[in-house]
């Protein structure tokens, strides 16, 4: 395997009337080709901002992004447009970013038109759209339907089809199943895994729900208020969690086997504000084990076991 994407010390701060909001604060990781990296954490911890910075929907405040070895942090113009062919995004609600007055066919076709994929050959383009629809499990008869005429599962299939239209190598999937019923969630996750196998796709899979990423992710990054608190393989993370925040997240997932008892760890207090954050560990105000040091100095990510990284002063 070889590295597809690397993120180095990425930061994204937003200026707000109350001060500087640290949405993403010094996050680093890399992803191998064909791999899925799960990114989990509570609402507002910076997952979407991280994904958007990586694919240039937002400009990072600091840090670097490398794609296939090339530093793409500051690309613009024609090179940026070119990079859209490689990197795409699937949204929780694809229709916040899509014109509701467009038909299914025209939604999927639009990226091909913008990027002149078929050099204006309408017949070729129409055929390509139908092929993608078939790939994602959308019946041909739906080509002239409008998004609002379809159910949530089919709508998300359009979002996936649109992301695939340019045959990207890498897709940021931002809560792609969170808005769907549980039964439909499994269908969409299966589809995404099949597509990954067939096309060798690499994913970042963003979710607030650890149980969703368990099966789909090779590696997992746990985020808390803009920072990375734990990262390792998915298998390891479900076996052993070091960070008290990860422990709390895991404890909220019901276990299938009835003979295992797990104490649910309830997090006390509200998530603190990411605006002008206090020094120290971001999780300290809610941590059951916090000591003085935790409020004074931000912990660095340390490799506690081979491949298992944790940012916590307890270790
Ligand atoms: N354009 C913006 N201007 C100011 N603040 C922003 C902007 N976009 C995001 N934020 C703030 O940045 C922080 C991270 O937001 P983000 O949407 O990345 O979180 P998230 O983990 O994706 O949350 P969710 O699970 O709710 O989608 C939040 O505090 C949010 O309010
Ligand atoms: Mg989000």
Image: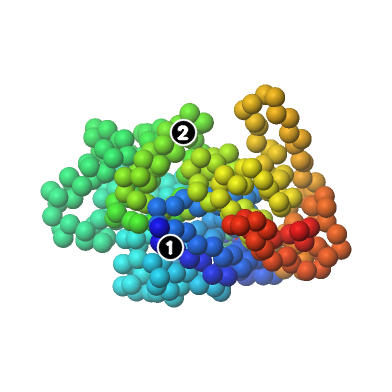
Compare residues 302 and 57 and report the one nearer the observer: 302
Asked if residue 18 can be seen in this view, the reply is: no
Would residue 199 be visible to someone looking at this image? yes
Instruction: Please say which color scheme the image uses.
Output: rainbow
Q: Residue at x 31, y 67 (%)?
A: 82
> Where does the image place residue 174, in percent across and percent down from the top left?
49, 50
Point out the frontmost of discs 2 and 1.
Answer: 1
10 Å neighbourhood of mark 1: few (<14), some, or many (≥20)? some
Query: Looking at the image, in which quadrant does ligand 1 appear?
Result: bottom right
Q: Residue furthest front?
A: 306
**Among the 4 quarters of the image, the one containing residue 214:** top right
Quarter of the rendering containing residue 238: top right
Question: Which image quarter is the N terminus in?
Answer: bottom left
Q: Position of residue 269 (x, y in %)?
A: 80, 49
Pinpoint residue 23: horizontal percent, then vertical percent.
Answer: 62, 63
Residue 220 % position (x, y): 56, 51
Please report the residue visible at 64 percent of the width from the left and 58 percent of the height from the top: 309
Foreground residue, 139 or 248? 248
The residue at the point 50 percent across, 52 percent down is 37
Q: Which residue is mark 2?
A: 186
Cβ of mark 1 under 8 A from ligand 1 = no
Please rate how many residues cluster around mark 2, counting C-alpha atoms within 10 Å: few if below 14, some from 14 to 19, many from 20. Answer: some
Please, is residue 296 above or below residue 221 in the view? below
Residue 30's place in the image compared with 198, above or below, is below
Residue 3 image label: 1
Residue at (29, 54) in percent of width and height: 167
Between the residue at mark 2 and the residue at mark 1, the CA separation in whole angstroms equals 28 Å
């Amino acid at each position: 395997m070889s590295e597809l994407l690397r993120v180095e010390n990425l930061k994204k701060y937003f200026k707000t009337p109350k001060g500087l909001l640290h949405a993403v604060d010094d996050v680093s990781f890399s992803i191998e080709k064909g791999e899925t990296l799960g990114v989990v954490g509570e609402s507002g911890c910076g997952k979407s901002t991280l994904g958007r910075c990586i694919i240039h929907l937002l400009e990072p405040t600091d840090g670097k992004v490398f794609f296939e070895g090339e530093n793409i942090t500051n690309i613009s113009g024609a090179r940026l447009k070119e990079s859209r062919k490689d990197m795409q995004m699937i949204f929780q609600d694809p229709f916040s970013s899509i014109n509701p007055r467009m038909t299914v066919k025209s939604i999927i076709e639009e990226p091909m038109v913008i990027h002149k994929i078929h050099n204006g050959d309408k017949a070729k383009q129409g055929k390509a759209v139908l092929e993608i629809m078939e790939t994602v499990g959308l019946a041909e008869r739906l080509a002239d339907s409008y998004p609002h005429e379809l159910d949530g599962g089919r709508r998300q299939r359009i979002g996936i089809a649109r992301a695939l239209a340019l045959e990207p190598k890498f897709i940021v999937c931002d809560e792609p199943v969170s808005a769907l019923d549980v039964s439909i969630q499994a269908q969409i996750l299966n589809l995404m895994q099949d597509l990954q196998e067939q096309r060798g796709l690499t994913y970042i899979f963003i979710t607030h729900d650890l149980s969703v990423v368990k099966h789909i992710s090779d590696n997992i990054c746990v985020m808390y208020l803009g920072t990375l608190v734990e990262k390792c393989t998915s298998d390891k993370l479900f076996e052993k969690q070091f960070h008290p925040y990860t422990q709390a997240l895991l404890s909220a997932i019901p276990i299938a086997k009835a003979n295992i008892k797990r104490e649910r760890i309830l997090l006390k207090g509200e998530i603190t504000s990411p605006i002008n954050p206090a020094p120290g560990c971001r999780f300290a105000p809610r941590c059951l084990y916090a000591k003085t040091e935790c409020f004074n100095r931000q912990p660095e990510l340390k490799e506690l076991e081979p491949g298992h990284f944790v940012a916590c002063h307890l270790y």
